[in-house]
Amino acid sequence: MLTQAVLSPENKELKKVELSKAIFGAPVRQQLLFDCVQIYLANKRQGTVKAKFRCEVRGSTKKIYRQKGTGNARHGGIRANIFVGGGVSFPPRPRDWHTTIPQKARQEALISALSLRKKEGNLIVISDFPCEEIKTQKIAKTLKKWGLAKCLVVIDQPDPKLWKSIRNIPNSELTTSTNLNVLDIVRFEKIVVTEKALQALEKRLS
């Protein structure tokens, strides 16, 4: 049976909750994690980079000097890639980097990432993360009580006040249990999950 201590905002243990072994005690599939991260990063690429071929560069098409008798190498035009201002050989062109991964594989990767953080002892469950007003300093002090310098906070429902309070804290981010993905977990060593978000995650991945 897997258990996890639930902490209060004052970093005191309130109780212990039972974790799903199928989600937080599953084997860690390193290759699947790597593949998922690569796909997430590839899908974030815009693919708008572009350079010009020699046929697209503005310039004269006239032969710059005669073929023989000058002592220079033979050249046909000023737009060749070896000249400054000329075209580019094999230039980067706009392309779509988007690729897909089966939903089941994506879910298995997320389970592997959560299991990895649990095995490392980097999963922290808290009772709640109250935020009555937009106050970055107050949230930063709460994170400091938990001994967190770089973390991902996972809540069950979007909270604009908490999001605005945490967005200016360096190396900290906020997400919901619905939007949590493998890349988020891999980027942050410590994962802070509220009790309600934990239940929502188990329901999502069961």
Image (cartoon, grey):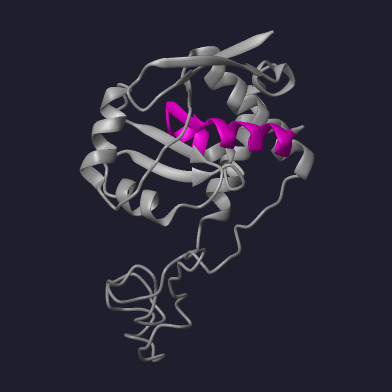
Using the image, determine if residue 37 lies above or below residue 42.
above
Report which quarter residue 85 is drawn in.
bottom left
- In this view, which residue lies farthest toward the top? 1
Residue at x 61% of width, y 63% of height: 96
Residue at x 71% of width, y 51% of height: 100
Using the image, determine if residue 136 lies above or below residue 53.
above
Front residue of this view, candidates 105 and 119: 119
Using the image, determine if residue 192 lies above or below residue 119.
below
Q: Which residues are drawn in magenta?
A: 184-205
Question: Which x, y percent locates residue 97?
Answer: 60, 58
Magenta segment's dominant SS is helix
Residue 196 forms part of the magenta stretch:
yes
Front residue of this view, candidates 128 and 69: 128
| Relative to 50, 96 lies left or right | right
Residue at x 33% of width, y 54% of height: 164
Front residue of this view, candidates 55 and 198: 198
| Relative to 151, 97 lies left or right | right
Question: Which x, y percent locates residue 99?
Answer: 67, 53
Question: Which x, y percent locates residue 7?
Answer: 43, 21
Question: Which x, y percent locates residue 42?
Answer: 56, 50
Residue 203 forms part of the magenta stretch:
yes
